Image (spheres, rainbow, N blue to C red):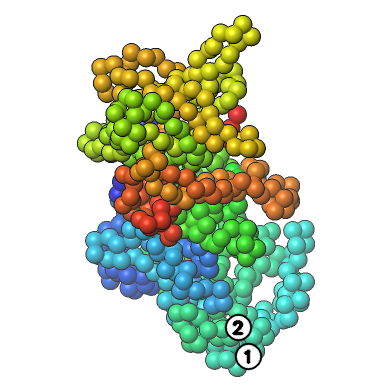
Amino acid sequence: MAHAPQSPDSPKPSNFLRGIIERDLEAGTWSPRHFGGSPGDAAHHRAGPADPAKIRTRFPPEPNGYLHVGHAKSICLNFGLARDYGGVCHLRFDDTNPEKEEQEYVDAIIEAVRWLGFDWNVGGTSHLYYASDYFDFMYRAAEALVGAGLAYVDEQTPEQMRERRGDFNTPGTDSPFRSRTPEENLARLREMRAGSLDDGAAVLRAKIDMASPNINLRDPTLYRIKRATHHNTGDTWCIYPMYTYAHPIEDALENITHSICTLEFEDQRPFYDWLLESLADLGLLARPLPRQYEFGRLNLSYVITSKRRLRELVAEDIVAGWDDPRMPTLYGMRRRGYTPASIRAMADGSGASKTNIWLDYAVLDGCLRADLEEQAPRAMAVLAPMRLEITNWAELFGSADHIEPCHAPAHPQRPELGERAFGLARELWIERDDFAEVPAKGFFRLFPPKTLPDGSVVPGNKVRLKYGLVVECTGCEKDAAGVVTKVLARALPDTRSGTPGANAVKVKGTITWVAVHDALPATLNLYDRLFTEPQPEAGGRNFREVLNPRSKVVVTGWIEPSLADTPREHRLQFERHGYFVADRMDHSAGHPVFNRITTLKDSWTA
Ligand code: ATP
Ligand code: MG
C-alpha cells in the first residue's frame, strides 16, 4: 500500500487510540483470544488457534447510501490502526435494517474502500462480513437472555412505553409486562418470531433498570416485529434486531478488540458492555470481550456530509448525481480527481480526538497538491482562448506556414518521464487575460505600444512563450463592438528556449499557449466549492442560501496535442492553471473532457 510520505519533521498527529492500543499490546490484554477462522460464538473461537491478529478493528457501514469523506476518516482510522499494529480490519455491512438497504450500495462501498487503498483479504482469508449472517445467533442470544430473566416481551403500546420511560429528571416506571416469568416470555418471543403477532404489537426488551440515570439502560428494545423482505435473508424473519443490540454482538462474534465509533455512541457504551458481559456469563461469547472507544467526527469546511442532505442535493438536481465531482462522496471525489493518497493523508493527518473537528477544506487540497506535484505530468492548455498572431513569422522562418518543433519535459524534476512535443507556429491560442490593452500597475504580460503626449513611443511589452521564444506585443485587432479579437506580436530572433541566445533578452513574464494548427478542443469543467460559507448549515441556515453559483463553470478550451490519447482518470497539471483529471465517464479521445481538481494555489484564504 503506497502512502503519502510524511516529512520527518512533521509532528505525528495526536491519536489517543494509539496510546490505548499500545498499552493493551504491552499488557497482553488481547493475547488470550482464540480465533475460529471465521465469526462465531464462544465454542467456535475456543476450538481455534490463538488469534493471529494482534488486534481486530472493523469498518461497519450501513449499506443505505454512498460513502462520504467522513466515512473515509473512519476507514483510514480502522484499517490504518490494524495495519500499524499487526492487526486485521474487517469490512462489515451492518445490514440489520431490512427496509433501506440495497445491493447497489453494497457494491459501491466495496469499490470505494478498495479504491481508497485498503484490503480485507489477509493471509488468504476475506474478512468481508454481513451482520445479517448473524441473525440466527442474535435470536439464540435473545432466547438465552429471556431464559436468564434478562429480557422480556413488552406488549405496551409505543405511547405507553414512551410515557413510562421518564426523562432526564424523572426515573422511568416498570412496564406491567416486566414481571412475566421466563417461560411466559420465551413462549411469547417464539410467537413473535413465528409471525403470530402483528407488526408493532410487541417488542423484546432488556431487563436492566427503569430508574437508571442513563436512559439507554432503561430496558432498551432488542427486537421489533417488522414484516419486511431483507436483501440477504429474504422473508425468513419477521422480527429484526435493533442496532444497539446487533452491533455489540457483531463485534463479539468477529473477535473485534477495539470497536471504534463516533462520539454520539458514548451513552450506549454501558449497554454495549452490559449485553456482552451478560452473553459471556451465559457462555455464548468468548472473553476477553470487545471494547468500544469513541472519537470525534471529521467535518470538512464548505462541505455537508449528512446522508439526508446529500440525498436532497441529488433529488433537487442541485448536483448532477451521487458522483457529481462537487459531491463529498468518495464516488464524487474520485470523479473530481482526488487521489486516494491525498484523502488518506488528510484523514491520517487529522488524528483522533474526543471532540468533533472541523478541518479546513484547504488541508485536503494541500494534500492533493503535495501528492500530485511530484507525480503529475505537465501540459499546456488555454482555458479562455484569444488568438495571437506573430506577424513577422514568414520573415523569420521563410514561410507563414512554417512549424517550429518544440519539446518540453513531461515533468520539470523528472527527466525519466520523457518529453512532450508540439509545434510553435504563426497563430497561437493564449489566455485572454494575458493581454491588456491598458495594463494595470504590475501587469507584466502582453500590452501594446503606447504613444506619449510628446510623441515618443513606448514599445509593447515582451513575454516569453513558454518553451518557445520571446514575442513583443505590437497591437491588437477589435470587432465592431470594440472587443479585442486578436493580439498581434512580433517574434524576436534568436530567443528560442534552449538555445544560447535564449537569455539575451530579459522578460518579466512567461505565458502558456497552444498552437492553432495542432491544439485539440476540450471541455474543461472548472469545479469549485459547492458552498460559499465554511459551515453551510451554521445556526440552522438553509444550505440552499449559500450555494456557490460558480461551483461549476464549463469552458471549451484548447489543449496541447500530446494529450490526444489520454486515458480516463489520468491526472495532470495544466501549467499555471491547476491539477486536472480526464473525466472517468465523459472523456474520450475524440472528445476530451477534463475536470479541474484544484488550482495550484489556494484562492479561498486571504
Ligand atoms: P451519516 O450519519 O453521516 O450518514 P452514518 O454514521 O449514518 O453516517 P454509517 O454507514 O453508519 O453512516 O457509518 C459507518 C461508519 O462511519 C460509522 O462507524 C460512523 O461512525 C463512521 N462515520 C460516519 N461519518 C463520520 C464522520 N464524519 N467522521 C468520522 N466517522 C464517521
Ligand atoms: Mg450510522
Q: Position of residue 346 (x, y in %)?
A: 46, 42
584 and 172: which one is in front?
Answer: 584
| Above or below for 603 versus 354 | above
Q: Amino acid at mark 2?
A: Ile
| Above or below for 549 versus 227 | above
Ligand 2 near label 1 (Cβ, under 8 Å)?
A: no
Image side of residue 404 versus residue 131, left or right: left
Which quadrant holds residue 178? bottom right
The residue located at (50%, 18%) in the rendering is 460
Q: Is residue 20 visible?
A: no
143 and 341: which one is in front?
Answer: 341
The residue located at (65%, 63%) in the rendering is 316
Which quadrant holds residue 605? top right
The residue located at (44%, 69%) in the rendering is 106
Q: CA distance from mark 1 to mark 2?
A: 8 Å
Label disc, if present, on residue 225 of the rendered structure: 2
Check disc 2 and report its element: helix, strand or loop. strand
State which tag comes first along the sequence, 1 or 2: 1
Q: Amino acid at mark 1?
A: Leu
Label disc, if present, on residue 429 of the rendered structure: none
Q: Residues within 10 Å of mark 1 (few under 14, many from 20)?
A: some
| Above or below for 533 versus 591 | above
The residue located at (56%, 26%) in the rendering is 436
* Disc 1 to disc 2: CB gap under 8 Å: yes
Q: Position of residue 135 (x, y in %)?
A: 46, 78
244 and 501: which one is in front?
Answer: 501
Q: Position of residue 443 (x, y in %)?
A: 54, 21
Q: What residue would you read off at disc 1? A: 197
